[in-house]
């Protein structure tokens, strides 16, 4: 059922580390003295190595398949002895660097096989002094905001969802506690920032050429419309523009600059590429409803993503593509997503481009099909986030033609766009049910083990 031309190339992404010491399952590195305290119990290798990366500020690489259940308790050991206690029968090599952090390689066979980078999860970033709140029908929101000393700066009256602004951090945190105990409040949480999308790279020699796809105008019923919640979508050329419905925006208009391709444009093209590969004779009736949730900025927030989802659903989208993500799990955004799922909207969300095993939202919201990326068939991309329960894994690389230039686009956002396009194209071409198509995709595009 599913055809997908797989295009693979590598890009390097940089990651930042932070220092942290936990009270339980703790590893404390006294860097000046090069001494270590540890208290870990029945801890698997990967989370242990994440703690080492945080505590020692090392870059750590591990051989795929290396495993160990670690239990150790000691105090004031030199780093070499500490590593022996923690890593047991696994081999390791610690390589100091003159102008950077030391490199630690952990392996079963040879050091050269320690290729998977251990990257520490980034903390959730909040928008200062803002809360999202979802209230019961009939709630006097103006009175509630006044009681909290807040100003309503955004509203979705249909869903009872509001964005509140406070004077400072202390007032914000105090209101969060009070609203959690208010009987009129269904959900309340911080407004989280989303990560900037990955950059595109011009390609001098790209294989193949632009996709060819012809629109079969959809009828009044049974239409398949992909809601693309992303940056604004620019012109893809006269033939492909027929597949793109008029742009909607919830974050203000983006600058009228068509010289630099946006992430939304790249995702729209990738969705259409996947649709083309499902379409008999290169003809399809699937359309894309773009919703700009960035407004010309490089980042967006939980609030604008929630607005974008509802705007797409209200405009007739029955498939949603969320090629974006945040470490912050907003309970209010969760609620908006669950309302869309209750309307039988099929949603695909990106797993994230930091190779850790912690969830990225909204992809990790139950009911959303989260998508991680492959670098080649059967192999997770080195940048791809992975956690138990990932739904699908598709190619993380796309070649996009914009103007007269080919661009390489890489990330789990690209894999998500492929997934949305495969699903929408198959639904339009075959008339199969959503559950049948998803079942086929999970068989065709399983998530490989590490």
Image (cartoon, rainbow, N blue to C red):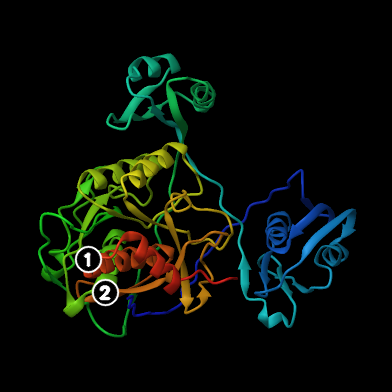
Residue shown at 24%/51% (left/top)? Answer: 317
Would you identify the image quadrant in which residue 342 lies? Answer: top left
Q: Quick one: SS at disc 1? A: helix
Specify few, some or many for label 2: CA neighbours under 10 Å numbering under 14, 14-19, or 20 or more. many
Q: Residues within 10 Å of mark 1 (few under 14, many from 20)?
A: many
Q: Which quadrant, please, contains the C terminus?
A: bottom right
The quarter in which the N terminus is drawn is bottom left
Work out how far the residue at label 2 is from the one at label 1, CA to CA, in angstroms.
9 Å
Please state which of residues 340 and 433 is positioned toward the viewer in this rendering. 433
Q: Is label 2 in a helix, a strand or a loop?
A: helix
- Is residue 70 visible in the rendered image? The answer is yes
The numbered mark, 2 or 1, whose residue comes first in the sequence reads: 2
Where 172 sits versus 336, above or below? above
Question: Label 1, on which residue?
Answer: 428
Residue in the image at 71% along x and 67% along y: 102
Residue at 74% across, 70% down: 96
Q: x, y percentage for residue 304?
A: 33, 42
Residue 324 against residue 178 in the figure, above or below: below
Q: For mark 2, what is the residue?
A: 278
| Left or right relative to 139: residue 211 | left
Q: What x and y, as percent, mark residue 378?
A: 51, 77
- The reply to whether residue 30 is visible in this rendering is no
């Amino acid at each position: 059922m599913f055809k997908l031309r797989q295009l693979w190339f590598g890009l390097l992404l940089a990651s930042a580390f932070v220092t942290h010491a936990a009270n339980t399952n703790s590893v404390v590195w006294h860097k000046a003295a090069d001494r270590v305290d540890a208290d870990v119990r029945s801890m698997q290798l990967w989370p242990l190595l994440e703690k080492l990366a945080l505590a020692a500020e090392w870059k750590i690489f591990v051989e795929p398949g290396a495993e160990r259940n670690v239990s150790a308790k000691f105090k004031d050991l030199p780093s070499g002895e500490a590593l022996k206690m923690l890593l047991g029968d696994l081999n390791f090599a610690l390589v100091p660097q003159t102008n950077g952090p030391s490199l630690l390689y952990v392996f079963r066979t040879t050091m050269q096989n320690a290729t998977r980078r251990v990257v520490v999860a980034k903390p959730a970033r909040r928008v200062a002094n803002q809360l999202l709140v979802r209230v019961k029908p009939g709630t006097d929101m103006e009175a509630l905001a006044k009681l909290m000393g807040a100003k309503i700066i955004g509203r979705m009256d249909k869903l009872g969802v509001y964005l509140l602004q406070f004077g400072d951090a202390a007032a914000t945190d105090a209101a969060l506690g009070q609203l959690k105990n208010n009987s009129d409040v269904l959900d309340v949480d911080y407004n989280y920032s989303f990560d900037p999308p990955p950059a595109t790279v011009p390609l001098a020699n790209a294989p193949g050429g632009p996709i060819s796809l012809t629109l079969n105008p959809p009828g009044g019923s049974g239409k398949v419309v992909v809601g693309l919640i992303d940056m604004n979508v620019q012109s893809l050329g006269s033939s492909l523009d027929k597949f793109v419905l008029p742009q909607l925006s919830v974050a203000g208009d983006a600058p009228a600059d068509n010289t630099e391709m946006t992430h939304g444009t790249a995702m729209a093209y990738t969705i259409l590429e996947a649709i083309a590969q499902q379409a008999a004779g290169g003809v399809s009736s699937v359309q894309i409803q773009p919703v700009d949730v960035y407004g010309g900025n490089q980042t967006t927030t939980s609030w604008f993503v929630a607005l974008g989802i509802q705007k797409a659903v209200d405009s007739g989208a029955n498939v949603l593509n969320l090629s974006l993500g945040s470490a912050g799990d907003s309970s209010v955004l969760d609620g908006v997503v669950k309302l869309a799922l209750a309307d039988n909207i099929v949603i695909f969300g990106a797993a994230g481009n930091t190779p850790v095993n912690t969830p990225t939202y909204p992809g990790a919201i139950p009911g959303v099909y989260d998508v991680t990326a492959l670098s080649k068939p059967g192999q997770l991309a080195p940048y791809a986030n992975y956690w138990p329960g990932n739904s699908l894994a598709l190619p993380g690389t796309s070649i996009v033609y914009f103007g007269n230039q080919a661009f390489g686009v890489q990330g789990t956002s690209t894999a998500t766009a492929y997934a949305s396009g495969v699903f929408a194209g198959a639904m339009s071409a075959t008339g199969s049910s959503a559950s049948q198509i998803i079942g086929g995709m999970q068989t065709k595009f399983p998530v490989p083990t590490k």
